[in-house]
Image (spheres, rainbow, N blue to C red):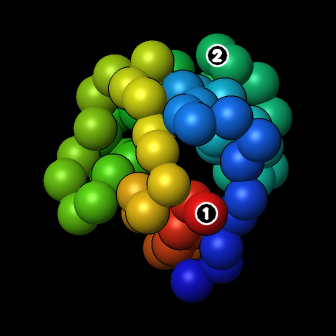
Amino acid sequence: MEKIAIRDESIRLGQFLKLVNAVSTGGEAKARIQAGEVTVNGAVELRRGAQLRKGDRVEIDGLLFQIE
């Protein structure tokens, strides 16, 4: 699990995926999220704009990230 620090209190899921280089564009993020390929705290998340906060865990392609 890789720990990722964010500057603000929260970050949108699509932005986070770009931050960790899991996707290269917002369009790719949208497609992968809508395809059910991303989980947040163990549950599939289908909203690109879902707000992530410290302590949340995001998984994509077998990679696990925790927000700090």
Q: Position of residue 34 (x, y in %)?
A: 35, 25
* Residue displayed at 64% across by 16% down: 27
Q: Which residue is mark 1?
A: 68
Relative to 17, 66 lies left or right = left
For label 1, the SS is loop
Task: Name which residue type carries label 2.
Answer: Gly
Locate the C terminus by quadrant.
bottom right
Which residue is depicted at the point 34% across and 33% down?
Answer: 35
The crowd level at tag 2 (other Cα within 10 Å; few <14, some 14-19, many 20+) is few
Q: Which mark is residue 27?
A: 2
Instruction: Say which element carries label 2.
Output: helix
State whether residue 64 is above or below residue 31: below
| Residue at 65% over, 73% down | 3
Mark 1: which amino acid?
A: Glu
- Farthest residue to the front: give it: 9
Is 28 or 3 nearer to us in this picture?
A: 3
**Which circle's residue, 1 or 2, is located before the other in the chain?**
2
Q: Quadrant of residue 17?
A: top right
Q: Is residue 66 left or right of residue 16?
A: left
Q: Nearer the viewer, residue 7 or 23?
A: 7
